[in-house]
Image (tube, grey):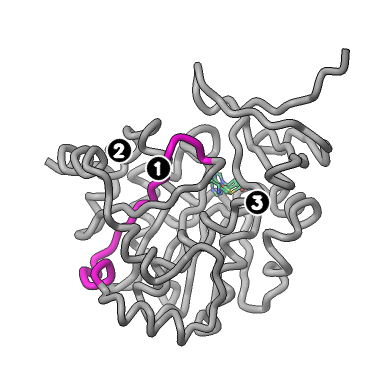
Amino acid sequence: MYCEETYQETLYSGYGQNFSIDRRLFETKTEHQHLIIFENRFFGRMMALDGVIQTTEKDEFIYHEMLTHVPILAHGQVKRVLIIGGGDGGILREVLQHTAVKEVCMVEIDQAVVDLCRQWLPNHSCGAYDDPRVTLVIDDGVRFVNNADTAGNRFDVIISDCTDPIGPGEVLFSSEFYRGCKRLLTNKGIFVAQNGVPFMQLDEVKTTVHRLGSYVSDLHFYSAAVPTYTCGIMTFAWGTDNHEARHIPLVDIEARFALSGITTRYYTPAVHQAAFALPRYIETAIAESMG
Ligand code: SAM
């Protein structure tokens, strides 16, 4: 009897999504994590790290557009961007759409993820790594943000495009990491980070409130629904001392979006503004964690 090969995500015990492996493209144990890239008839090419789905060709645009364009268009005058993680190159591709951005530094712990995604997921980076504005640093993000020289090296937007807080990604949810990011942010700089699916990972919201809240005066979250980050909306952490940034009038976001010349498939100025409206249970978790 033919038994279809499937990939079972192991992020949660007792629940998980699985995908038919229609074509196994590459699998290895890198210096830092287990990596598999395979083809699925519905989601296209997909990558998983340490048993957790990271990205798929079908739905990556949602996550990469929202984690990138919300902080950049909210800030309005971004010249330098720091990306932590992001080895598949999707965030880098979206940041580079902004021609006003002059420098992008990307700190990824695993060279193998960069190399294998350039080879097997080329539609994610789309040549972004070859852009002269890009500096790729292979390092642990928490080490980089705490040791990098701050003189002339601060960033208007810092994007933590990390894995879940397991394995090498765990430190990217630590106070030490947030402290390091704050020291590298400009005065009006904005920090954003993938912060899990609160229906399943509400503790990640509470932990971020406790830890990041010590370093910024405006801590909030915004959201988007990414199909393969299952169980509802996912949250993005938002941390800044720039109190206007989260309240830009829609007409101004629309003007900045039009001026930027970027093209999107998910992000719109109205979605940007609406993304900061959170369900009651998430608002309650934030308020209780701040108290
Ligand atoms: N979009 C995915 C998500 O939301 O789960 C994450 C995309 S990207 C594949 C996550 C990247 O974070 C990986 O390339 C991984 O190697 C990198 N990473 C994990 N821990 C890291 C660390 N401590 N420093 C820098 N990069 C790290």
**Secondary structure of residue under mark 3:** loop
**Secondary structure of residue under mark 1:** helix
Amino acid of disc 2: Thr
Q: Nearer the viewer, residue 59 or 154?
A: 59
Return the disc, 2 or 1, that comes first in the chain's sequence.
1
In the image, residue 98 above or below residue 178: below
Q: Nearer the viewer, residue 43 or 181?
A: 43
Q: Nearer the viewer, residue 66 or 237?
A: 66
Report the magenta residues as a range.
229-247
Q: CA distance from mark 3 to mark 1?
A: 27 Å
Q: Residue at x 42, y 72 (%)?
A: 72
Q: Give x and y (percent) for residue 98.
A: 53, 78
Whether label 3 lies within 8 Å of ligand 1 gets the answer no
Whether label 2 lies within 8 Å of ligand 1 gets the answer no
Relative to residue 214, is residue 149 drawn left or right?
right
Return the disc, 3 or 1, that comes first in the chain's sequence.
3
The mark found on residue 207 in the picture is 2
Mark 2–mark 1 CB contact (< 8 Å)? yes
Relative to residue 216, is residue 55 drawn left or right?
right
